[in-house]
Image (cartoon, rainbow, N blue to C red):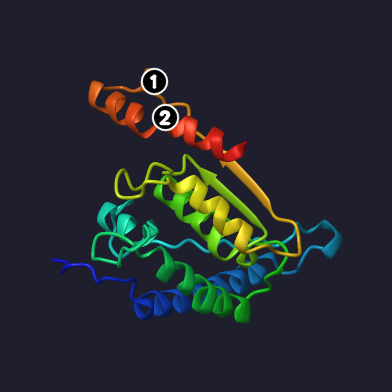
Amino acid sequence: GEGPPSTTPDPLPREEHLRQQIVERQNQDRRADNRRGRRRPDALRPDPLVVLAVGHPGNAPYHPPLRQRDYTPLAPGQQPTAERGGADALRNFLARTALPMVGSALPLHPQRRTLYGHSLGGLFTLHVLGTEPGLFTRYAAASPSLWWPPANWPDGWIPRLQQHLAQHPRPTPITVQLRVGGLETPEAAATPQRASNQSERRMLWHVQTLAQ
């Protein structure tokens, strides 16, 4: 079985896995070209799309403990633990390891990079926007967990993000897309417990407040 998660994301297994995925993708492209026999004219080919998906070990579609560890930022005065606060480490892994490695093997346009995340991943997306906005030019956060953490952060996450953005301006424009799922309100909740959670977290209100 798995041992306890480390305090911060370990870049070495991710780096090796990423290297293997790049090699496999290059081999797939070459095999596809060989099957076609000839390439289509450049004018008929769509712009290439490179998708870098960051996940966790194992076959489960989600790993809640590691998602919480890796995608959550620290409140002022907090230190990373095995359960939370690894957002800076994951951001640094993307910036210092993942993107340079992929960029060395595949053509990446520096002005056409998009970071997408959902739920806690959406919170992480906005954290990167607030702390290192130049890393991507487009940010898409779907149902971001702006309620995190529920306590010990008196001024809230949105003022903190606004402060970060004011302190880290960037010379080129960025695009931010915010979305909220149709089931993120208490009225749409399937169970009373989920309705209570949705009422406490105020997902739609947080996103509307940030958008304004």
Q: Amino acid at mark 2?
A: Glu
Q: Which residue is mark 1?
A: 188
Place of residue 178 in the rendered image (x, y in percent of width and height, measured from the top left): 57, 41
Residue at the spot x=53%, y=60% of the render? Answer: 128
Residue type at tag 1: Ala
Q: Which mark is residue 72?
A: none
> In this rendering, would 142 be left or right of 174?
left
Front residue of 58 and 138: 138
Q: List x then y, in percent, for residue 72.
A: 37, 56
Is residue 199 positioned above or below 210 on the image? Answer: above
- Which quadrant is the C terminus positioned in? top right
Write down the residue under mark 2: 184
Q: Position of residue 54 (x, y in %)?
A: 44, 63
Looking at the image, which residue is at 65% across and 60% down? 49
Q: At numbered mark 1, what does the secondary structure look like: helix, strand or loop?
A: helix
> How many angstroms separate mark 2 from mark 1 (CA)?
7 Å
